[in-house]
């Protein structure tokens, strides 16, 4: 499975919580270079005019 293609297609997509409420926008997916598996995501949070710093989330 090629994760790089999937990540590029999903960048800037909405990220939702378990109740389908938007929590932010997907900024990046960090990949473990030894296994090529995604390990963490960066989510941009806040309104477009006042973005707060990105939030890192373990997968």
Image (cartoon, rainbow, N blue to C red):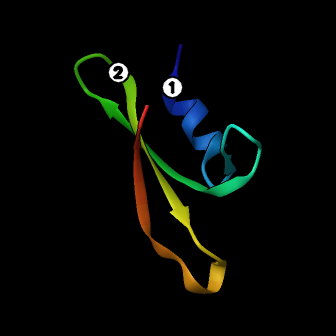
- In percent of width and height, residue 39 lies at 36, 30
- In percent of width and height, residue 29 lies at 45, 41
State whether residue 58 is above or below residue 49: above
Where residue 47 sits, quadrant-wise, is bottom right
Q: Residue at x 74, y 51 (%)?
A: 21
Q: Say whether disc 2 or disc 1 marks the residue closer to the N-terminus.
A: 1
Front residue (pair 17, 32): 17
- In percent of width and height, residue 40 lies at 39, 38
- Circle 2/circle 1 CB separation < 8 Å: yes
Q: Residue furthest bottom?
A: 49
Where residue 10 sits, quadrant-wise, is top right
- Secondary structure beneath dot 1 equals helix
- In percent of width and height, residue 37 lies at 38, 21
State whether residue 57 is above or below residue 4: below
Q: Residue furthest left?
A: 34
Query: In the rendered image, which residue does mark 2 sit on?
Result: 36
State whether residue 31 is above or below residue 1: below
Where residue 31 sits, quadrant-wise, is top left
Residue 3 circle label: 1
């Amino acid at each position: 499975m090629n994760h790089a293609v999937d990540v590029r297609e999903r960048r800037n997509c909405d990220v939702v919580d378990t109740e389908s409420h938007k929590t932010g926008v997907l900024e990046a997916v960090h990949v473990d270079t030894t296994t090529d598996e995604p390990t963490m995501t960066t989510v941009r949070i806040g309104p477009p005019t006042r973005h707060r710093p990105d939030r890192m989330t373990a997968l």
